[in-house]
Image: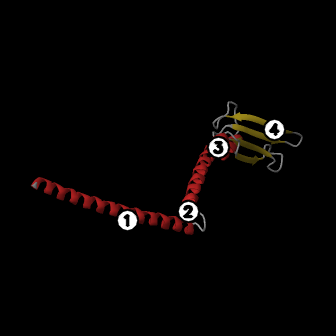
Amino acid sequence: MKLNFEFNIFNVILLVINILVLIIYILNSIKLSKLRKNYADFMTKLGKGNNINDMLESYVKSVEEIKKENTEIEQYCKKIDEDSKQNLKKIGMIRYNAYKDTGSNLSFALAILNDNNTGIVLNGIYGRDTSNIYAKPVVEGKSEYALSKEEKEAIEKATK
């Protein structure tokens, strides 16, 4: 009989502990519900009538799309930079007097080169009775044709 009595006390203690745990669980669930409601109300007020969580999700999607567009733009700009290296954009010009008996510096040497110092050099020689223009290809700052002093100066000026 003694064993039954101890067993019953043990069961009663377990029952009381279970009831207390159940009450604590219910109280916590009620508090959690209130917190969620307060949080939702706060987020709605903070978003001026719109739920701020929804707004944040929308902004995150927008930022991801913008990042993707930025990557595409950066790739396009790199391609343009590479392509522009081939454009003729360096210019050097020297004016000179080709003949002693002709006044003024009406003759010229004009170098037009790209980033690799490749392009052309034009030499316009002015005389009283005639005027001639000669073109020579330039590759990496040098030409396979003989260059005059003025043409070399124009190339040097363009490469600075």
**The image quarter in which residue 140 lies:** top right
Helix, strand, or loop for circle 3? Answer: helix
Q: Residues within 10 Å of mark 3 (few under 14, many from 20)?
A: few
Q: First in sequence: mark 3 or mark 1?
A: 1
Mark 3 vs mark 1, foreground winner is 1
Q: Which residue is mark 2?
A: 52
Q: First in sequence: mark 2 or mark 4?
A: 2
Q: Which residue is mark 3?
A: 76
- Residue at 52%, 68% in the rendered image: 42
| Badge number at residue 27 | 1
**The image quarter in which residue 132 lies:** top right
CA–CA distance in space, label 1 to label 4: 99 Å
Relative image position of residue 143 (x, y in whole percent): 67, 33
Left or right: residue 126 compared with residue 92: right
Q: Is residue 123 above or below residue 14?
A: above
Mark 2 vs mark 1, foreground winner is 1
Q: First in sequence: mark 1 or mark 4?
A: 1
- Residue at 59%, 55% in the rendered image: 58
- Residue at 70%, 37% in the rendered image: 119
CA–CA distance in space, label 2 to label 1: 28 Å
Mark 2 vs mark 4, foreground winner is 2
| Badge number at residue 133 | 4
CA–CA distance in space, label 2 to label 4: 73 Å
CA–CA distance in space, label 3 to label 1: 60 Å
